[in-house]
Amino acid sequence: MKRTTELVSVFVFLVLLAAGAAGAYAASLRWGVTIGWFAGAGAFVVAMAAGAATNVAAQWERVIVLRLGRFHRLKGPGLFFIVPIVDTVPYWIDIRVITSAFTAEKTLTMDTVPVNVDAVLFWHVLDPKRAALDVADYRSAIIWAAQTALRDVIGKTSLSDMLEGRDKISTELRRIIDDRTEPWGIEVIAVEVRDVLIPAALEDAMSMRAQAERERQARVILGDSERQIAEKFRDAARTYADDPSAFHLRAMNMLYEGLKNNSTIVLVPSSAVDTMQLGSAAGLTSLAMQLGQRNGNRMAGTERATGGPRPEPVER
């Protein structure tokens, strides 16, 4: 708002100067040229003083006014006037929420790991008088206080806690910084940790550790699945042991499906054949041949329907 203040001051100066010039001209006509010159000089001085005394503060600004070096009053927002030479305006305080970024580079954690941490501070001036009079440069002071607090928190926190608990670190930082800046009339609204950078070698090691942990969990899950399958097989075996007919039907169905779908050679122990009461091995072979011939006839019918080549006759 300094530009606005300058424009208003110039406007007031020009208006008063024009009014004084008109008065000086009238005085010179009535009382002489000498009186007119004195009146013009006086009007110029008054216009300069009025222009210097005029100030305008924005809605978000508060102005510290010192009179002969001592605190006189706090002005703003809007138009206000000061006494030139006697009053001075050293500070224009912005009371809006201000965002400041700060970092801590190569700071050792509690487990001696160097990290770089970036954070953002949200704060505003709660008491403009204390912010102007109790600290030389409140903007620089709050940044330094934030960096110091961040280094203290990092030194008391392990790397794993820092990577997993950013909200907790942000809350602790806000508390520490707010305690330090409260005597300056500054209130900390929030602190957010943006990023935590660790050395590349350590990052690779952590990635390998995470991959090994995932592989371990996969093996554990696979072993648990095999254990559950074994339990199911054990339950099925107990069922078949108590019901031989069910076992025979299941065995015959598995043998039939294998010969039907794949037309492959299936090795079956003779004891199992006797148990399933399928007859001799020759009878089992005949059954396999019949199933294979049936599958061949089915494929030939499919080719004739689709216009494909017919199968060659087989000599027996």
Image: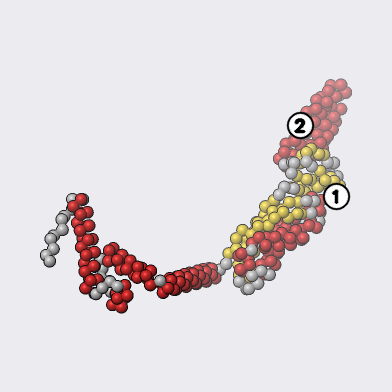
Asked whether disc 1 touches disc 2, contact meaning CB atoms under 8 Å apart, the reply is: no
The reply to whether residue 163 is visible in this rendering is yes
Question: The residue under label 2 is which amino acid type?
Answer: Leu
What residue did someone put label 2 on?
Answer: 14
In the image: residue 187, left or right of residue 69: left
State the SS at label 1.
Answer: strand
State the SS at label 2.
Answer: helix
Give x and y (percent) for residue 138. 75, 55
Position of the N terminus, as image quadrant, is top right
Give x and y (percent) for residue 97. 71, 49
The reply to whether residue 116 is visible in this rendering is no
Give x and y (percent) for residue 262. 27, 65
Which of these two is toward me, 143 or 151? 151
Q: Earlier in the sequence, mark 1 or mark 2?
A: 2
What residue did someone put label 1 on?
Answer: 71
Give x and y (percent) for residue 252. 32, 68
Residue for point 85% across, 31% down: 38
- Callout 1 crowding tier (Cα within 10 Å): few <14, some 14–19, many ≥20: some
